[in-house]
Amino acid sequence: MRRYLRVLILCLACGFCSLLYAISQLAVSLEEGAAGGGGKPQAAVASWLAASGRGAERGAGPASGAGLLDRYNLKIQPIEKMHLAVVACGERLEETMTMLKSALIFSIKPLQFHIFAEDQLHDSFKARLDSWSFLQTFNYTIYPITFPSENAAEWKKLFKPCASQRLFLPSILKEVDSLLYVDTDILFLRPVDDIWSLLKKFNSTQIAAMAPEHEEPRIGWYNRFARHPYYGKTGVNSGVMLMNMTRMRKKYFKNDMTTVRLQWGDILMPLLKKYKLNITWGDQDLLNIMFFHNPESLFVFPCQWNYRPDHCIYGSNCREAEEEGIFILHGNRGVYHDDKQPAFRAVYEALRNCSFEDYNVHSLLKPLELELQKTVHTYCGKIYKIFIKQLTKSIRDHYDRPSKER
């Protein structure tokens, strides 16, 4: 009898242990479910979409699901943000806002805008950007125009007011690893994500990426008129400049002023002092000089990433744009605001007047094509289809994505 009793007690003990194990496994599976199936949406809410701040600097606020996250002590992976910088002075508010809108319409990953502007433009930028807060796909910070105090006046009057501010971005935005700088007269015709992905194509020596100034040497400016060194055969254009700023801050640059290599913050003023009487295009010329001496540090992307009137004003000379369309439109020389290049102006007006509603984005194509057909009397207008080829694809891809990713 005692033997049977002992066996019964042993069986009960084993059964109780099994029950405890089953309960513990159930608890673990619930935690894994919170971290797995629902982890990504919660992370998105916590790190980006719950942006609640407003003002000169807008950042992510506490998420409504924070208590749940604390309960399970989840490790949230931060969502990668693309950093976009622009410098705006004078009458550039509307042009800059149109550029920012074009960046937001098609991009997938969230954007962080770094806007350097004259003081009188700050309130207008803030009001306009806050009116877009319903998008929940971007943050912004507005900065004053600042130059090194001992040479501020000289830097500010170089080429155009405030244009040389871009040279000091690695020193000002010390916490930013990589950055896309663009001029105010830029329009994105495909997601910013695509040019941002070129950072992964940099080799170990490359710190920045730009497009050539010209494709056709016979109409090139640098190779015909420059009185200073420049990169490659025709120089580079700095209106669209992708930067790995961590590398820029660390690099020691070869130069023609001293046998000692200088870092980014130390080379700018000596360059200006040596070449200020020989440069025409200001900060762009200084960048050309710098990369002439350090060609291994530059990644050159094709002309379709920085398409300007020079690529069609005397006939088409950007082969990549002919094949795949224009990726980024650069309306330099004020062509968005006069009648000299109506094809460029038509694209600008279409995006300026477009709102963020899906139907509005979709409906801009047909009216734009009709406007472009009116420009065929110009060389750029004769190839008007390259202005909408990539834009059409971007809109189609935009609609193919699930609504939660837009």
Image: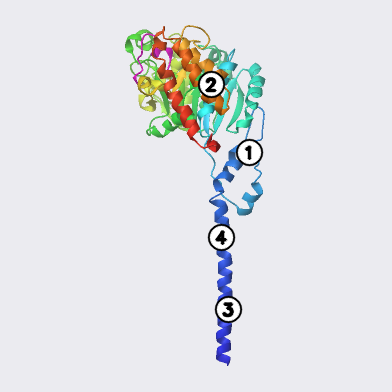
From the viewer's perspective, tell me whether residue 51 is left or right of residue 276: right
Secondary structure beneath disc 4? helix
Q: Tag 3: residue type?
A: Ala
N-terminal label among 1 and 4? 4
13 displayed left or right of 268: right
The residue indicated by pointer 1 is 50
Please provide percent x and percent y for residue 306: 43, 20
Q: Which residues are magenta?
A: 307-319
Question: Which callout, 3 or 4, points at the residue further toward the start of the chain?
Answer: 3
Q: Amino acid at mark 2?
A: Met
Q: In terms of image quadrants, where is residue 296?
A: top left
- Asked whether residue 272 is drawn in magenta, I would say no
Task: Residue 126: name its quadrant.
Answer: top right
Instruction: Name the residue beneath numbered marker 4.
Output: 28
**Measured Cα–Cα span from mark 2 to mark 3:** 72 Å
Q: Secondary structure at mark 2?
A: helix
- Asked if the residue at tag 4 contacts the one at tag 3, i.e. Cβ–Cβ closer than 8 Å, the answer is no
Horizontal side of 214 relative to 148 (left or right) equals left
Q: Earlier in the sequence, mark 2 or mark 3?
A: 3
Q: What residue is shown with label 3?
A: 13
Residue 130: x and y, percent?
65, 27
**Majority SS type along the magenta span:** loop
The Cα–Cα distance between marks 1 and 3, rounded to whole angstroms, is: 50 Å
Spatial CA distance of label 2 from label 4 is: 49 Å
- Residue at the far bottom: name it: 1
Residue type of the residue flagged with mark 4: Val
Query: How far apart are labels 3 and 4 at the CA level?
Result: 23 Å
Name the residue beneath numbered marker 2. 99
Q: Earlier in the sequence, mark 2 or mark 4?
A: 4
| Residue ID at (59%, 16%) | 94
